[in-house]
Image (spheres, rainbow, N blue to C red):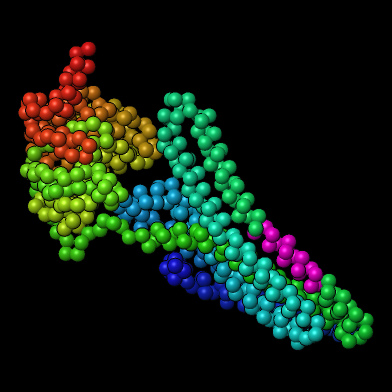
């Protein structure tokens, strides 16, 4: 796990390596200064040698400045390497998520992926910054200070030797207890982010139903769970500092007691005692720094595992080796296809689907809510893979195609229309980034979008805002249809994508399709019979199975489900 994650230090290895080098220079000066101070006191002040005091004082100031210089360099290098590491890690995670299939995203949830890309990586960044400074500074300072202290007075050094095992036991206990608590805290973070994301996406619905108080109450419940989890985790960590300080100051008191007696008895110089106390402070401070480094490791360990899970997750849908590079035509065939979102043959969304569709056919799909209409068409561009059976497109199994080739040949207007920040033209060019203005206008005319776009003051350069907030639901649908048309696909799938437009506009769009997409296979999922009655064939879905296939006239005569839907819609229209 550590090798995988820290490999993303990448081009910032130089700064990460030079940081400890600068720290060595900083520590060397800090360790030498107490020895100089002892000489200044014992050979200068006590002996009345002001020249020695001056020389030693200037030397101490120079060493302090050199230490400051190395410290500043080390701080900058650690910050640059840690931030660069976080940038690379966040970029790697984002690229990995882009390769995920829908099932991979379903596994983690978008809220959890957001937390892992933000909070978890920030935790890792802070831990890395502390590591490259503390992991070198603390041991080096401790070793050098111990050597200097033992050299000065080995008997008095036994005081802090006794303190080390106590500190180690405290750290071990806290590390063992804290990790599961921080892991639980991050899970609550996921839930809180999910609530925020859901609320912001549906803010118009929240306001329309006057549910602000309800959403606020639910959010408070989530934040309260996060707070309790944080308190539960942090109350262990906050015990570290007082425990360390107790041991540290107890050691200093013991050294002052025994060292003071030695100084009075003449077995130890006053300057040596002052320097010894400084070394003891450095040793105990180094131990505290190491302790906090371990604490930071505990905090970030849960984040490391969560990030590692994403980086090592294998996309369930990938391009095969020696993939077919071209979709010859728009023919589609389902052979004994069954599908489950849970990979469970006892919980099927689609069951035993068999149908053969010629290139250029227009296929309507009708069925009640939950009849798996969308599940059926999502298997064609491999948004999901069939659990059992085979799906063919252009005469080849869809699993034989390069994913980019397949999806570039299959345009899909999803049930939930998504537009991105930017202009209308920017969004349309998602269909074809090299599309000319003429091609864009032709696609928009086919989708009945050109007229309302030109009514905007800036036309195609109108800024849509985040998620297309500046356009209505019907306008958004027509822009999404135009975007799909710009791909010039072999197969186009309209998943209830004209539900927000009036029947006249729906009719105009279907007419444009017949005239301009005569060689493109079209799948039209709809709730309105009028949207599919002109199709070459209509599939009637019921509970994940094909109940009937035929033309509008054939189904009116032979299929009860279709006839019932048609008659209810006709009755509603008449009324």
- Between 528 and 135, the one lying in front of the other is 528
Q: Quadrant of residue 492?
A: top left
| Residue name at image x 19 percent, y 52 percent | 388
362 to 172, vertically: above or below: above
| Residue name at image x 66 percent, y 70 percent | 169
**Residue 172 visible here:** yes
- Between 368 and 119, the one lying in front of the other is 368
Q: Where is residue 421 in the image (x, y as percent from the top left)?
A: 37, 41
Left or right placement of residue 395 versus residue 423 in this view: left
Q: Position of residue 153 (x, y in %)?
A: 80, 85
- Between 477 and 184, the one lying in front of the other is 184
19 to 268, vertically: above or below: above
Is residue 497 in the magenta section? no
| Residue name at image x 53 percent, y 61 percent | 300
| Residue name at image x 71 percent, y 81 percent | 146
Q: Quadrant of residue 547?
A: top left
**Residue 514 visible here:** no
Report the residue that reaches farthest toward the front: 346
Q: Quadrant of residue 241?
A: bottom right
Q: Is the magenta stretch mostly helix, strand or loop?
A: helix
Number of numbered markers: 0
Q: Quadrant of the C terminus?
A: top left
Left or right placement of residue 275 versus residue 334 in this view: right
Q: Quadrant of the N terminus?
A: bottom left
457 to 171, vertically: above or below: above
Is residue 244 in the magenta section? yes
Q: Position of residue 184 (x, y in %)?
A: 53, 53
Left or right placement of residue 52 versus residue 427 in this view: right
Q: What stretch is highlighted in magenta?
A: 237-252
Q: Position of residue 475 (x, y in %)?
A: 28, 30
């Amino acid at each position: 796990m550590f090798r995988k994650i820290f490999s993303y230090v990448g081009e910032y290895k130089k700064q990460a390596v030079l940081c400890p080098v600068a720290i060595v220079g900083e520590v060397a000066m800090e360790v030498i200064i107490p020895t100089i101070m002892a000489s200044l006191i014992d050979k200068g002040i006590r002996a009345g040698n002001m020249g020695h005091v001056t020389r030693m004082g200037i030397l101490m100031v120079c060493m302090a400045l050199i230490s400051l210089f190395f410290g500043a360099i080390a701080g900058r290098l650690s910050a640059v390497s840690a931030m660069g590491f976080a940038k690379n890690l966040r970029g790697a995670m984002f690229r990995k998520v882009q390769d995920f299939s829908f099932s991979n995203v379903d596994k983690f949830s978008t809220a959890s992926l957001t937390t892992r890309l933000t909070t978890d990586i920030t935790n890792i960044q802070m831990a890395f910054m502390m590591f490259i400074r503390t992991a070198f500074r603390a041991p080096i300072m401790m070793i050098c200070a111990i050597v200097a202290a033992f050299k000065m007075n080995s008997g008095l050094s036994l005081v802090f030797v006794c303190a080390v095992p106590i500190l180690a036991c405290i750290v071990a206990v806290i590390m063992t207890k804290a990790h599961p608590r921080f892991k639980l805290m991050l899970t609550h973070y996921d839930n809180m982010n999910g609530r925020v994301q859901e609320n912001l996406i549906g803010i118009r619905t929240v306001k329309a139903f006057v549910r602000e108080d309800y959403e606020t109450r639910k959010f408070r419940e989530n934040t309260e769970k996060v707070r309790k989890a944080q308190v539960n985790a942090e109350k262990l960590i906050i015990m570290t500092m007082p425990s360390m300080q107790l041991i540290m100051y107890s050691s200093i008191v013991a050294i002052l007691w025994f060292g003071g007696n030695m100084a009075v008895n003449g077995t130890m110089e006053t300057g040596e005692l002052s320097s010894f106390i400084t070394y003891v402070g450095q040793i105990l401070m180094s131990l505290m720094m190491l302790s906090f480094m371990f604490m930071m490791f505990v905090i970030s360990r849960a984040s490391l595992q969560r990030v590692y899970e994403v980086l090592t997750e294998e996309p369930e849908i990938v391009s095969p080796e020696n993939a077919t590079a071209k979709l010859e035509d728009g023919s589609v065939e389902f052979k004994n296809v069954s599908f489950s979102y849970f990979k469970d043959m006892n919980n099927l969304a689609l069951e035993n689907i068999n149908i053969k569709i010629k290139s250029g056919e227009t296929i309507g799909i009708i069925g009640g809510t939950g009849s798996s209409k969308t599940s059926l068409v999502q298997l064609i561009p491999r948004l999901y893979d069939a659990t059992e059976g085979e799906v063919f497109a252009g005469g080849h199994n869809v699993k034989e195609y390069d994913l980019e080739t397949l999806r570039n040949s299959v345009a899909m207007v999803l049930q939930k229309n998504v537009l991105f920040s930017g202009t209308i033209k920017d969004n349309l060019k998602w269909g074809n980034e090299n599309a000319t203005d003429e091609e864009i206008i032709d696609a928009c005319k086919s989708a009945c979008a050109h007229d309302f776009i030109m009514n905007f003051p800036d036309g195609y350069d109108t800024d849509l805002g985040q998620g297309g907030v500046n356009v209505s639901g019907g306008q958004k649908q027509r822009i999404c249809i135009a975007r799909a048309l710009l791909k010039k696909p072999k197969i186009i799938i309209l998943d209830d994508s004209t539900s927000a437009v009036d029947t006249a506009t729906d009719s105009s769009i279907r007419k444009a399709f017949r005239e301009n997409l005569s060689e493109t296979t079209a799948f039209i999922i709809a709730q309105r019979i009028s949207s599919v009655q002109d199709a070459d064939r209509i599939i009637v879905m019921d509970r994940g199975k094909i109940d009937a296939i035929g033309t509008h006239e054939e189904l009116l005569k032979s299929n009860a489900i279709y006839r019932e839907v048609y008659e209810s819609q006709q009755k509603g229209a008449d009324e």
